[in-house]
Image: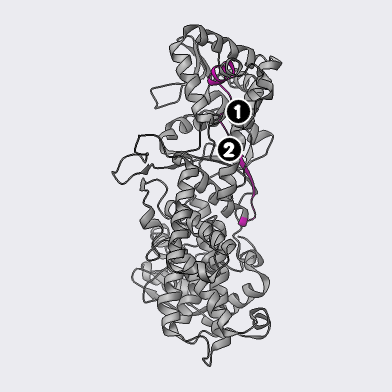
Amino acid sequence: MATEEDNVGNIKRQLAKIFDVSLRTTVPDETDVEPLVAACAGKFGDYQCNNAMGLWSKIKGKGTQFRGPPSVGQAIMKNLPPSEIIESSSVAGPGFVNVVISKNWIAKSIQNMLIDGIETWSPRLPFKRAVVDFSSPNIAKEMHVGHLRSTIIGDTLARMLEFSNVDVLRRNHVGDWGTQFGMLIEFLFEKFPNWEEVTETAIGDLQTFYKASKQRFDSDPVFKEKAQQAVVLLQGGEPKYRKAWAQICEISRSEFNRVYERLGVQLEEKGESFYNPYIPNVIKELTDKGLVEESQGARVIFIDGINIPLIVVKSDGGFNYASTDLAAIWYRLNEEKAEWIIYVTDVGQQQHFDMVFRACKRAGWLPLEDNKYPKTTHVGFGLVLGEDGKRFRTRNTEVVRLVDLLDEAKNRSKAALIEREKAAEWTEAELEQIAEAVGYGAVKYADLKNNRLTNYTFNFDQMLNDKGNTAVYLLYAHARICSIIRKSGKNIEELKKTGTIVLEHEDERVLGLHLLQFAEVVEEACTNLLPNVLCEYLYNLSEIFTKKFYSNCQVVGSAQETSRLLLCEATGTVMRKCFHLLGIVPVYKI
């Protein structure tokens, strides 16, 4: 169990410690019992302990004094140690122990967070270092809507883990190695005799350049042979070819960085080429351990239950994705000392990663049990669909460029603000900044609020709607909170030091309890790698604030103004942290 100080903001963990004491008293001979505590929305309480039924099945027939799950539940309740957290407790049904959380303790916890900072509510996870491998576009190809999900989901997972005090290595495993580079390099030499001086401007659109070189490769046998020879020279370290390769990568990289900058995403690139030098030793280690076998001229690893082998050396002696991925895992475990390696790619790559991970387990690099560290996880996600229910494309069936998508979101957001006559109220810089925050935030949230495994339909009108579960609604709700505090004319920093939160009204208590569940929600989202859990929490927080607290509890000018202003500030603080974890920039006025 973590220490009291470590989990000041986590009700579920605090209650688990209290129930742990009770369980040890109730069934001293059962040593491996973990408290099962869950939030509940029932009329009997805020949380419940669900151990009674499981315990009864363990102890019945052992000469116990209990007569069934309800009597076990009664004993668990009776043996609860005194605690300022629990206001009352009761037993329902087959032994569920329900507890009502003390409203004074909720108020005090929120007040402490306002003084000490929301970081005191960050979860404590059972590992210290993780690699999150996300985005990973291919050099010389444009970032498209398919990369959007990987980039947004990966960034949010990294942010949530970082908030939970994990050292996160954000890795961009770009496709910067392989046969296509021979084709690109030869085309570069042919098109630009003075290729060493060629800039991004001269090459122009790298995507067009790639297509032209591919067309040439497919239609001209002489060019094709030159390109194949160029791959050999590049991989053999020929300086001229290495230099040309580095130049193409650099031009591509600056295009990617423009997209990352707009999305506010930080990544450290370690592309396929980085792991290339490690592959031979990794293949040797796997061969020495008896994992690698010859099959039809190739070298492969057979995985139980899967009828296709994992090819680690192709029949022509070349390496492939599997070789690189195995070398990357070896490096991340041995050199970077990662305890959890997380791969964010579409669900179509599930089997590939499953085979790679199982090969690593066979090699003894990873424990056989999935719940032990170090471990690897594939975070799959579904497709982005258009209005027609098919893969999202432009009218001429091209994949949608990410840059165009972000431009469109910002422009639509700006048009909506101008329509609401904000151009007259705000400076041009404010209008631009808020249009960007709302537009980009809308695109991110529309993706993150869905369970990542499902496909979702890309629809600007829905995303930019200010009603319902959208970023626009949430950003406006946050701006409204800021406006209430501004209108009060009070110095909120002073109130934090001198004021007191009192939760007398039922809707104040509902809001306070939901605020305090923030830490356990982030922990759940991190443990299961599901950003939509955090989105659902944030949306519910906005709904509780707007439809319960704000509708029924007057703030400015009321007798409870100080307490309610502090509740507004606490809600704003938690919302801002949720926005940060989702990579969304908050707005302070609407």
Color scheme of the displayed model: one colour
Dot 2 corresponds to which residue? Answer: 255
Asked whether 411 or 37 is in front, the reply is 411
* Residue mark closest to the camera, 2 vs 1: 1
| Numbered badge on residue 92 | none
**Residue positioned most to the left:** 388
Report helix, strand or loop for mark 1: helix
**Residue positioned most to the bottom:** 559
Drawn side of residue 470 relative to residue 14, left or right: left
For label 1, the crowd category at 10 Å Cα-Cα, with few meaning under 14, some 14 to 19 and many 20 or more, is few
Residue 528 percent location from the top left of the image: 48, 51
Dot 1 corresponds to which residue? Answer: 202
Position above or below: 41 against 251: below
For label 2, the crowd category at 10 Å Cα-Cα, with few meaning under 14, some 14 to 19 and many 20 or more, is some
Can see residue 22? Answer: no
Residue 58 percent location from the top left of the image: 42, 57
Q: As shown in the figure, which amino acid type bears the numbered disc 1?
A: Ala
Position above or below: 355 against 475: above
